[in-house]
Image (cartoon, grey):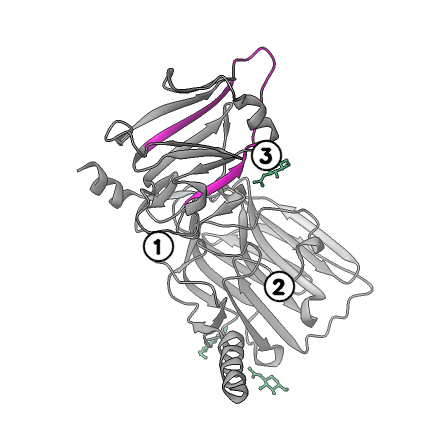
Amino acid sequence: MVPMLLNLFLILLLKGTLGDQISATGVINLAHRQSKWTPLMHISANLSEVKSIRSYFQFRTLDPEGAIFYGDTKDGQDWFVLSLRDGIPEMQIGKADILVSVKGGRKLNDGSWYLLELRSEGKFVVLEVNNEVELVVGLHSKLAEEELTGKIRLALGGMLVDKHKLFHPFEPEMDACIRAGHWLNLSRPWDTDKTWEPQACFSNIKKGSYFPGSGTAMFNTSDLPGLQKNEAGITIKIFGSWTGILLSLQSTGFLYVLGENDGGKDVKKVPETLTFTILKTALMVNNKPKLESDSQDFLSMWKNGMLLTFGGKPEDSEGEKGTQYLRGCLEKITVQGQVIDLDRALYKHSAVSSHSCPTEAMNELTS
Ligand SMILES: *[C@@H]1O[C@H](CO)[C@@H](O)[C@H](O)[C@H]1NC(C)=O
Ligand SMILES: *[C@@H]1O[C@H](CO)[C@@H](O)[C@H](O)[C@H]1NC(C)=O
Ligand SMILES: *[C@@H]1O[C@H](CO)[C@@H](O)[C@H](O)[C@H]1NC(C)=O
């Protein structure tokens, strides 16, 4: 019995440490991850083997914020990360005693493909977009050693150093696609995060959060905008086209599900806006009461923290079969007028795309 267990343990250990390998020259979807900061894929090379300190790739996103490309030397003592913030490229560099953060150039999150090139030119790091220099960062430290020896590591969609090293923190989840990448002229396959299941990229995308019918995104209402003065209740507005459960609200001993037993009534095949209002003792859909209660104070429940789940019921978050999960595109969700970003959810199923919907599937849904 013991040797068998030991064997099993060794097999699991090997499987666990080896992970999988993938080519970094094809189409890579940076979304759909289980863990936020762990890169989708990474590679390590001897600097002596690196012929060119230049990487270029095509990049497409509608997401304003997230991690794109990371590199380091000396096991992360010197590091570099390219991300987006407000749709604009941002570079952060940590080297010896220096931390730098530089943001600039055009917005890239318009859903079209851009050619990005990053290269190192002596003490400068250069970012080009569509063959035009967009950002140049110069860096000098008396403490930094200049010789390039040892290992270089590269990673996509996350970082290999602790997020606390960042000068300017950001939300790492990135709903984006990369293709035709050339990375320091390395041709070997990269190692992937074991939990990652590669997903295709939609050929045409539009703004919105896409729910393919297999999972949810969950918020604690105490993290969302709350009551404003002189205002009656909390208003959630959803614009989009969908079938299945739109949302649910849960707190101890209370569950409300919108869309489950309403037959076809809440099926929105043509994009339109649904208004869900939470009053002290009533829940309203498009200004019609759906649930009234004398015993519950929904507004206190909202303030203290209920679970607001888009796309299903909270207990089904792990992908339970038979649930009427939402299928469709929620083009815009606002709470008290503020746009809600699913990248900031407590939990989001890895199948849900937070910032892009396929235009093809929507045609399927409307036909
Ligand atoms: C890097 O160098 C070390 C020792 O110098 C060597 O063992 C290793 O195989 C090299 N790795 C690659 C990928 O060339
Ligand atoms: C990249 O590698 C290819 C094949 O190994 C080689 O032909 C090419 O010259 C290299 N480019 C650079 C810039 O080193
Ligand atoms: C929601 O947030 C509140 C306040 O921070 C906390 O007390 C509550 O436990 C949270 N609920 C869940 C389900 O995380």
Mark 3 and mark 2 in contact (Cβ < 8 Å)?
no
Q: Which residue bears the numbered disc 3?
A: 223
Q: Is residue 237 magenta?
A: yes
Sequence order check, earlier mark of 2 and 3: 2
> Mark number for residue 160?
2
Callout 2, which amino acid?
Leu
Mark 1: few/some/many CA within 10 Å (<14, 14-19, 20+): some
Mark 1 vs mark 2, CA separation in Å:
25 Å
**Quadrant of the picture in which ligand 3 is shown:** top right
Is residue 233 depicted above or below 58 in this figure?
above
Q: Position of residue 202 (x, y in %)?
A: 32, 51
Q: Is mark 3 within 8 Å of ligand 3?
A: yes
Please give the range of residues in magenta: 216-240
Q: Position of residue 104 (x, y in %)?
A: 59, 44
Q: Tag 1, which secondary structure?
A: loop
Q: Position of residue 167 (x, y in %)?
A: 71, 50
Query: What residue sits 52% from the left and 50% below the top?
Result: 173
Closer to viewer: mark 2 or mark 3 = 3
Callout 3, which amino acid?
Asp
Q: Which residue bears the numbered disc 1?
A: 201
Mark 1 vs mark 3, CA separation in Å:
31 Å
Q: Position of residue 120 (x, y in %)?
A: 61, 63
Mark 2 and mark 1 in contact (Cβ < 8 Å)?
no
Callout 1, which amino acid?
Cys
Residue with the most extreme left position: 367
Q: Nearer the viewer, residue 16 or 144?
A: 16
Query: What residue sits 67% from the left and 59% below the top?
Result: 162
Q: Nearer the viewer, residue 26 or 128?
A: 26
Sequence order check, earlier mark of 1 and 3: 1
Mark 3: few/some/many CA within 10 Å (<14, 14-19, 20+): some
Query: Image quadrant of residue 300?
Result: top right
